Image (cartoon, rainbow, N blue to C red):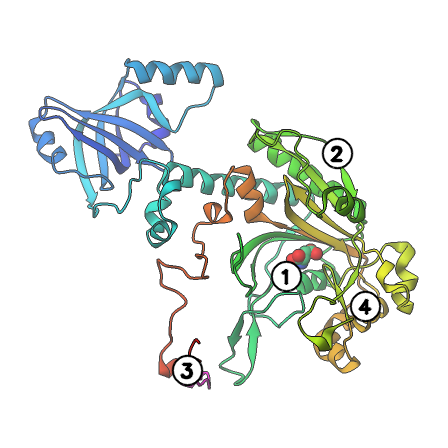
Amino acid sequence: MKRTLIKNVHNELGNIVTIKGWIDVARNQGKMAFFDFRDVSGKVQGVVFDKPEVMEVAKTLRPEWVVAVTGIVNERNDKSAKEFKENLANTGTREFFIKDVEIEITEIEVLNQADTPTFEITESTGGINEEVRLKNRYLDLRTERMQNNMQMRHRVAKLCRDYLDEQGFLELETPILTKSTPEGARDYVVPARLSPHQFYALPQSPQQYKQLLMSSGMERYFQFARCMRDEDLRGDRQPEFTQLDLEISFATEEDIITLNEELLVKIVTELYPEKRIQQIPFPRISYTESMEKYGNDRPDLREDKNDPNVLAFCWIVDFPFFEKTADSDDPQAQGEWTFTHNPFSLSKPEHIENLKSRQNIKDIVAAQYDIVLNGYEIGGGSVRAHDPEILQSILRILGHSDEKIETNFGHMLRALGSGTPPHGGIAWGFDRLMMILQNEKTIREVIAFPKNGEGRDPMMDSPSEISQEQLDELHLELKPLKKES
Ligand code: ASP
């Protein structure tokens, strides 16, 4: 029989349906058996009575077994059904657990059995040891909370895609096997078998490629981009994470800010109607003002921090372009300049001359903006230097020799010199945005398969060793590990 999704079972009152899914709860009461069944769309109760042959099967069933269940849809009239109906009448939304109907089971087919799950799937796994959750992530993801997190992640991504498509953006992929870029973090590298002793780098972000797409005349680009940064995993970091990355030709800072603000407001109003944005348009605060007033550049502007449904967005603008690496441990580096955000940015128009002549460096303000939500930086971007002379000047301020500029950035300079339009863009930390929207405490709760605090995947047991044969093919030899003192 054709499968009915559980969320649609209530439309079939009096009819015979077949549902397919998991046994959430099994309660065998001797002559009768009750079940809660679960699929991607909802939960519903099923009951077996007066059917000895079905009862024989029912007795054997255990939680997490996968079943096809056929039966008649009846109305429910108990206490929880009444509560469900009242809530439905008040809010118009059907809860995940459908309680106004139940299925009087006439047939059960077991599609697969299951080992006893390591933890309860029926409850939120928030309190369970995270290592255990990650090792059994496929079980963890079956819980209602995690299913909801994944579904909302999809909904938000889809809304972004649809909106950006309407606005004339192309969704384009950029390479994962790429070249080391100076974006501030350590690269993950991949040995290139066909070019022995050479390595690809995994992208820290598609920064150069998205700018090269502007050189290529694509005008409006976006991508849900996977970014890899080999950093120490302090706090809530992941070695790989997702950005909503975009770039626009002929755009001013104002254009980019307006478009992003419109998209964020749309996400909240359409997908999170229970949430309230504290202020629209989002307040804009200069970096200097934010540091003076709040002591940081990601202020939490919520007037009421106890309310999980308040979203206080703001833009932080006018960042200093350069800072001294004075606190570097490396004495050689003392007094050198580094970029605060992105070496490819442009300064504010009034500072372009200083950028070109490399004067008053500490006062140069970048056309750089960060989007902050409830005390978290959820994105950042800038208007870019599209004049090769300016980019070259920036790279010289950063202390790169002409030779190094040619090896690392020659392609960028040539592309800018080939007729690249003015452009700018932004990237959102998509995981962090989803974490806040879903009222979660870590980004791991909104990523299907995250790594643990040591950067490991306990389920796959990765990273792992590779065979001698693989090493030989790559011309790699492993040095013995240094003994820890
Ligand atoms: N690529 C930058 C980053 O990853 C964002 C941007 O400037 O578009 O932070």
Decide if ligand 1 comes within 8 Å of the CB at mark 1: yes
CA gap between label 2 and label 3 equals 55 Å
Using the numbered discs, state the Cα–Cα distance from disc 4 to disc 2 in whole angstroms: 33 Å
Residue at image point 18% right, 41% down: 110
Residue located 36% across and 61% down the image: 460
Q: Amino acid at mark 2?
A: Pro
Which SS class for mark 2?
loop
Indicate left or right for 341 with 443 as reference.
Answer: right
Crowding near the residue tagged with mark 1, few <14, some 14–19, many ≥20 C-alpha atoms within 10 Å = many
Count the numbered circles shown. 4
- Quadrant of the rendered image containing residue 351: bottom right
Residue under pointer 3 = 471
Magenta region, residue range:
471-481
Q: CA distance from mark 4 to mark 1?
A: 20 Å
Between discs 4 and 1, the one toward the N terminus: 1
In the picture, residue 203 is in which quadrant?
Answer: bottom right
Tell me which amino acid carries mark 1.
Answer: Pro
Relative to 418, say whether 124 is above or below. above
